[in-house]
Image (spheres, rainbow, N blue to C red):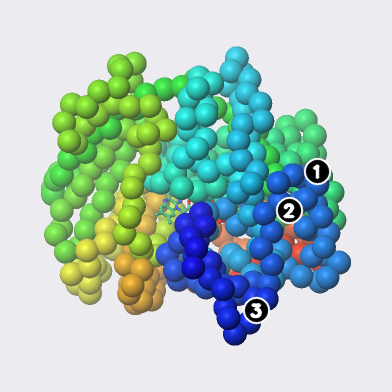
């Protein structure tokens, strides 16, 4: 048994040519016949062409930190051998990066070049293309999700061709490709618009319901990044703010410190869980949280896993959960060793009542009919997908129910 990029791979002695792997949480185990780790665009192209010729499905894997069954029983392709900076342009705050680069490796590389990602999620274990492709986000009412930083990318299409997509080349495809879950092709590199390197000041404290009621709106408005966690079993609120600062790195206390942004954004999440997250219109966010809290106090009062409350700016990406609306994102968790269905099913009913759209990388039960009414650009995305991959090389059973 070996661990690879957070993914468990093991030989299946009863099926010599078939191996199995599972995602980070262990909820989804996939048999696969071939695992490809190309080291060049040419090798990616050969892998795609081979699948197309043999009628096999190919699914890309980043770090398999998604909670959905994105993979396949045919071919899994990892870009772990395609990592690193290809070029940087500090005056314009841009960098061209190999798509397999792990975010935790990217941070120091960009810092050395005087650059920072404007926004990151709660962890940095993801592959860059994997994080971008599901719309990974952090928190901050003025900040959109990570794929909004993309200004160009290179795809290997279902035909095995290389397709450059940027603001000047094939630009009509750019917004569709930014959040596309590997359905338009294999992303081999991305060019990002970044920020000059910056430090973040993190502050953490705990409070109660009345503090959250009184201060929440102000904390959202007056901090670059604000979020809170609330756990049913304690009824305690854990607040967290991050703000850019010109001060140098220092630790003021166990709950307050300043460090380079790439060190402050991510947290350690050693305990494994499954997660469901929906983005609801900002003005519905608090009422949605209150209804979830009432439900959890009534039905799951001993649950130790928190509800997380974050915000995100509106954008124009067709498959963004924040498409044309500011949102509150609310996520619920359950330990990986327990069944999550009871908790998540109950929460999902509330999320949907408040007009929520599900995070693409996290558990949800929606299918094509529901999704098509949530996303005004859904049909246009499906047309682009069909045009680029009519044979469905990049479509597995899970995605077929959502997009085909
Ligand atoms: C502990 C934990 C914390 C998390 N915190 C956050 C958070 O704060 N905010 C948030 O928004 N999300 C969060 N997530 C979700 C996570 O960011 C996403 O699920 C992300 O997609 C995982 O990245 P990955 O590299 O593991 O991609 P994978 O899960 O491996 O893949 C995700 C998708 O991207 C596709 N893909 C991967 N590489 C390529 C490529 N080269 N070309 C084309 N398609 C590709 C895959 O086929 C798949 O459809 C968290 C997940 C975990 C486990």
Secondary structure of the residue carrying tag 1 is strand
- Looking at the picture, tell me which residue is in the foreground, 261 or 183: 261
The C terminus lies in which quarter of the figure?
bottom right
**How crowded is the residue under tag 1: few (<14 C-alpha within 10 Å), some, or many (20+)?**
some
Residue at image point 71% right, 63% down: 58
* First-in-chain label (3 vs 1): 3
**What residue is shown with label 1?**
163
| Residue 227 image offset from top left, x and y in percent | 30, 43
Q: Is residue 33 visible?
A: yes
Q: Nearer the viewer, mark 2 or mark 3?
A: 3
Residue occupied by mark 2 = 185
Q: Residues within 10 Å of mark 3 (few under 14, many from 20)?
A: few
Alpha carbon of mark 2 to alpha carbon of mark 3: how far?
A: 29 Å
Looking at the rendered structure, the secondary structure element under dot 2 is loop
Residue at 52% x, 35% y is 106
Give coordinates of residue 394: x percent, y percent: 72, 62
- In the displayed structure, does residue 113 sit left or right of residue 351? right
On screen, residue 285 above or below 242? below
Question: Residue shown at 38%/37% (left/top)?
Answer: 265
- The residue at which mark 3 appears reads as 16
45 lies above or below 313: below
* Horizontal arrangement in the rendering, residue 320 relative to residue 119 (left or right): right
Is residue 32 shown left or right of residue 366?
right
| Residue 214: image location, x then y, percent | 17, 42
**Is the CB of the residue bearing disc 1 within 8 angstroms of ligand 1?**
no
Residue 317 visible somewhere in the drawing: no
Tags 1 and 2 in contact by the CB under 8 Å rule? yes
Q: Dot 2: few (<14), some (14–19), or many (≥20) neighbours within 10 Å?
A: many
User: Would you identify the image quadrant in which residue 192 lies?
Assistant: top right
In the rendered image, the residue lying farthest to the bottom is: 14
């Amino acid at each position: 048994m070996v661990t690879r990029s957070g993914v468990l791979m093991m030989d299946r002695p009863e099926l010599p040519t078939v191996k199995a792997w599972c995602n980070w949480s262990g909820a989804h185990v996939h048999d696969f016949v071939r695992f490809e780790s190309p080291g060049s665009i040419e090798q990616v192209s050969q892998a795609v062409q081979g699948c197309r010729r043999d009628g096999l499905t190919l699914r890309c894997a980043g770090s398999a930190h998604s909670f959905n069954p994105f993979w396949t029983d045919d071919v899994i392709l990892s870009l772990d051998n395609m990592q690193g900076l290809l070029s940087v342009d500090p005056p314009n705050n841009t960098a061209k990066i190999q798509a397999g680069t792990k975010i935790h490796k990217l941070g120091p590389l960009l810092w050395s070049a005087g650059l920072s990602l404007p926004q990151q999620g709660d962890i940095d274990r993801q592959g860059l293309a994997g994080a971008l492709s599901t719309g990974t986000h952090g928190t901050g009412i003025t900040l959109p999700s990570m794929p909004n930083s993309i200004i160009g990318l290179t795809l290997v299409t279902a035909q095995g061709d290389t397709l450059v997509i940027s603001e000047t080349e094939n630009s009509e495809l750019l917004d569709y490709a930014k959040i596309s879950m590997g359905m338009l092709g294999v992303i081999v590199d991305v060019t990002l618009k970044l920020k000059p390197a910056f430090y973040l000041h993190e502050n953490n404290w705990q409070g109660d319901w009345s503090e959250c009621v009184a201060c929440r709106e102000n904390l959202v408005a007056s901090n670059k990044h604000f979020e809170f966690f609330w756990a049913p079993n304690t009824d305690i609120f854990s607040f967290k703010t991050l703000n850019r600062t010109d001060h140098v790195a220092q630790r003021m206390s166990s709950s307050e410190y300043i460090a380079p942004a790439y060190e402050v954004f991510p947290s350690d999440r050693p305990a494994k869980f499954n997660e469901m997250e929906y983005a609801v219109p900002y003005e519905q966010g608090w009422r949605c949280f209150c209804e979830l809290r009432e439900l959890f106090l009534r039905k799951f009062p001993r649950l130790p896993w928190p509800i997380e409350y974050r915000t995100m700016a509106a954008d124009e990406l067709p498959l963004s959960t924040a498409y044309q609306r500011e949102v509150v994102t609310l996520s619920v968790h359950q330990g990986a060793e327990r069944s999550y269905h009871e908790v998540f099913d109950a929460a999902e009913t509330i999320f949907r009542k408040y007009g929520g759209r599900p995070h693409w990388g996290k558990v949800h039960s929606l299918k094509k009919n529901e999704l098509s009414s949530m996303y005004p650009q859904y049909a246009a995305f499906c047309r682009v997908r069909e045009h680029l991959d009519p044979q469905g090389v990049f479509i597995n059973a899970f995605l077929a129910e959502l997009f085909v």
